[in-house]
Image (cartoon, rainbow, N blue to C red):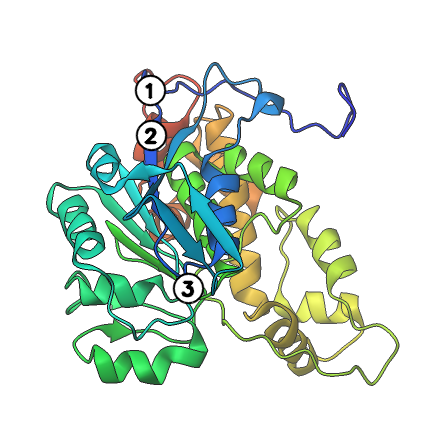
């Protein structure tokens, strides 16, 4: 993208970054999927000069149990990485998947995973990396997901895990799991949003040319049948609705706009997005509310009206469900004047 292009992401505020960037360690083991390693380095390792930040969002450490590690059946060899002892300085540990997920991980890798969790670090798995987390004993009694192709095998090996096989990712607080390699991008952007707010996450997604927000509850496997008509794309309808989130949009109204029945609209949303029209609309409205709060709007009723959520009470419920934070807490964490005015 040319320097000075009007398409460069523009932040309405400069966030206050910590003195030391959040440190992310990525464990690369024998057979690790290189695409997922690339996803982690793209999300957490690249500088973001286009955002005009005063420092990096993250610092990344690639860690291996041996000096030389062969990834993806030997197609790639990684050398010169940090040893597993570097994991002990990380705030977040990322464990990508392997195609041979039923082969036990080495004791050193499992110990590194356990140590990170025991000292309060955040642990993320990508695709079948959840097998390693389960093998380390982190997932017993907890919610998690994995790739749909391996769900039955996962249940057999780890019956104590509360597996959710049909979702993109699961955020269970200090442990997060993504269902597949592409869903690793969804989970990564979710983490950026959780750490730095909606506006920075949207800017990162634009650089990736990737959907800014797909909720973790959306389905993993989205059917794409051959259409009976030349074009059934939802893109024009989604763009139209995003420009009118503050208006009283309804599923029936969206169906009328698309010139289809509500039932047909539901089928298209399920097939193309893996979610329902109402869930998509609510998610877009909450995302807009987050941006308004980040840009300094302090009046809760104004935020609720402008994003189409109606009342402040409804906004509180939706925001807490989506981000785990109340409007006050969200503003204190991501607003332009942290610690000053507090939203009711």
Q: Earlier in the sequence, mark 3 or mark 2?
A: 2
For the residues bearing labels 3 and 1, Cβ distance under 8 angstroms = no
Nearer to us: label 2 or label 1: 2
> Regarding mark 2 in the picture, which secondary structure is present there?
strand
> Regarding mark 1 in the picture, which secondary structure is present there?
loop
**Mark 3 residue crowding within 10 angstroms, few (<14) / some (14–19) / many (20+):** many
**Residue 234 visible in the snapshot:** yes
Residue at horizontal 26 percent and vertical 63 percent from the top:
132
**Mark 2 residue crowding within 10 angstroms, few (<14) / some (14–19) / many (20+):** some
| Mark drawn on residue 240 | none
Q: Quadrant of the C terminus?
A: top left
**Residue 313 visible in the snapshot:** no
Residue at horizontal 16 percent and vertical 76 percent from the top:
160
Alpha-carbon span between mark 3 and mark 1: 30 Å
Residue extending farthest to the left is 118
Percent from the top left, x then y, of residue 338? 35, 19
> Regarding mark 3 in the picture, which secondary structure is present there?
loop
Above or below, comparing residue 24 to residue 245 in the picture:
above
Which residue is tagged 2? 22
Residue at horizontal 42 percent and vertical 32 percent from the top:
196
User: In the picture, residue 84 is in which quadrant?
Assistant: top left
Above or below, comparing residue 300 to residue 117 in the picture:
above
For the residues bearing labels 2 and 1, Cβ distance under 8 angstroms = yes
Which residue is tagged 1? 18
**Mark 1 residue crowding within 10 angstroms, few (<14) / some (14–19) / many (20+):** few
Q: Earlier in the sequence, mark 3 or mark 1?
A: 1
Residue extending farthest to the right is 230
Q: Give the side of residue 251 with respect to residue 217, left or right.
A: right
Which residue is tagged 3? 127
């Amino acid at each position: 993208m040319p320097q000075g292009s009007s398409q460069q992401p523009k932040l309405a505020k400069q966030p206050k970054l910590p003195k030391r960037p959040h440190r992310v360690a990525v464990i690369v083991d024998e057979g690790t999927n290189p695409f997922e390693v690339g996803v982690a380095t793209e999300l957490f390792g690249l500088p973001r000069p286009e955002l005009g930040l005063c420092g990096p969002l993250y610092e990344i450490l690639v860690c291996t149990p041996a000096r030389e590690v062969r990834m993806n059946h030997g197609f790639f060899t990684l050398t010169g990485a940090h040893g597993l002892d570097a994991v002990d300085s990380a705030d977040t540990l990322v464990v990508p998947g392997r195609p041979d997920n039923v082969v036990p991980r080495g004791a050193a890798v499992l110990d590194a995973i356990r140590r990170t969790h025991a000292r309060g670090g955040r642990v993320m798995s990508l695709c079948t990396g959840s097998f390693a987390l389960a093998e380390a004993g982190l997932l017993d009694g907890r919610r998690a997901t994995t790739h749909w192709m391996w769900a039955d095998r996962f249940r057999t090996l780890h019956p104590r895990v509360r597996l959710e096989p049909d979702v993109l990712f699961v955020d269970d607080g200090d442990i997060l799991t993504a269902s597949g390699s592409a869903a690793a991008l969804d989970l990564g952007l979710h983490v950026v949003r959780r750490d730095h707010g909606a506006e920075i996450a949207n800017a990162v997604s634009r650089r990736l040319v990737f959907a800014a927000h797909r909720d973790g509850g959306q389905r993993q496997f989205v059917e794409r049948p051959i259409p009976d008509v030349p074009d059934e794309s939802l893109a024009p309808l989604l763009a139209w609705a995003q420009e009118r989130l503050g208006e009283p949009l309804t599923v029936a109204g969206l169906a009328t706009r698309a010139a289809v029945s509500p039932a047909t609209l539901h089928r298209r949303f399920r097939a193309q997005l893996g979610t329902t029209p109402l869930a998509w609309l609510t998610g877009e409205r909450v995302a807009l509310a987050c941006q308004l709060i980040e840009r300094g709007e302090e009046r809760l009723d104004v935020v609720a009206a402008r994003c189409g959520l109606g009342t402040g009470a409804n906004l509180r419920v939706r925001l807490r469900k989506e981000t785990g934070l109340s409007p006050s807490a969200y503003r204190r964490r991501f607003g332009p004047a942290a610690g000053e005015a507090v939203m009711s």
